[in-house]
Image (cartoon, grey):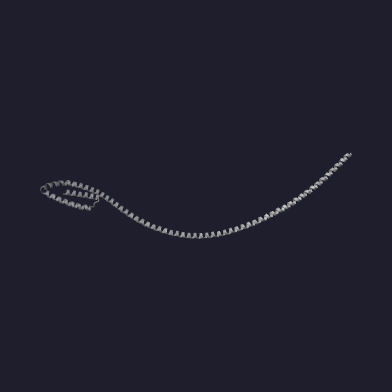
Amino acid sequence: MKNNRLMKNLGKATVAAALLATGVSPVLAATENKTEVKSNKTAAESSSKKTSSPESSKASSSSEASKSSSSAASSSSKKAAKKSAKKSTKKAAKKSAKKSTKKAAKKSAKKSTKKAAKNTKKVAKKTTKKAAKATKKSTKKAAKDTKKAAKTTKKSTKKAAKDTKKAAKTTKKSTKKAAKDTKKAAKTTKKSTKKAAKDTKRAAKTAKKSTKKSTKKAAKNTKKAAKTTKKSTKKAAKKASAKSTSASSTSSAK
């Protein structure tokens, strides 16, 4: 009976260690062990009743002999059971710790990702709102600046058009004046040219007349000079002939 109990306890310890290693809850294992113990008790009682009458003397002698051997076996089996239980509990604890850490890491990662997604959504909403406000303000400012620039451009265009009209008018007046001055200058030039031509003709006539008079006077003077020269030449010739005749007469007289 003691050996049977020891074997049952060993079996329970190994089953509990295996259940812990596989991750099965020890409460279920305990309930299963209870049912197994009950069934084993009923089986042991029935077997003892059957063998009690003729073999009771043999069983008593053999039980005494087996007590010593069973005590040694029970001590060794207890040690082995403790070792196996320790190993199995350590393995089961490690596995359960790993599983729990993995689950916790997954849960924390999920939570952190959810929080990060929420935060990013909030930040994105805020940034988009700020950017929309800033773009709205800049668009309004740009529209105002564009209106101002359009007004100034319109004013400068009108002023430039007025200045262009004034310049065109002044240019027209100056052109007309220049045309009149040119006409006057042409007329005066024509008149002065005609007067110069007349003066030139008059000067030519007077020069011609004076040249004719001077030429006639020079011719008369030349004729007079020729006559006087002729007369003086005749006188000189006469004197020379008279001298020669007197000289010849003197020479013949000698």
Q: Is 188 situated left or right of 242 in this image? A: left
Q: Position of residue 33 (x, y in %)?
A: 19, 51
Q: Which residue reaches farthest left?
A: 54
Q: Position of residue 115 (x, y in %)?
A: 34, 56
Q: Position of residue 248 (x, y in %)?
A: 86, 40
Q: Which residue reaches farthest right?
A: 253
Q: Is 150 situated left or right of 88 in this image? A: right
Q: How many marks?
A: 0
**The C terminus, quarter of image:** top right
- The residue lying toward the viewer, choosing from 186 and 175, is 186
Q: Is 155 situated left or right of 13 in this image? A: right
Place residue 185 in its image quadrant. Answer: bottom right
- The residue lying toward the viewer, choosing from 90 and 157, is 157
243 versus 125 height, above or below: above
Q: Position of residue 181 (x, y in %)?
A: 61, 58
- The residue lying toward the viewer, choosing from 217 and 28, is 217
137 versus 62 height, above or below: below
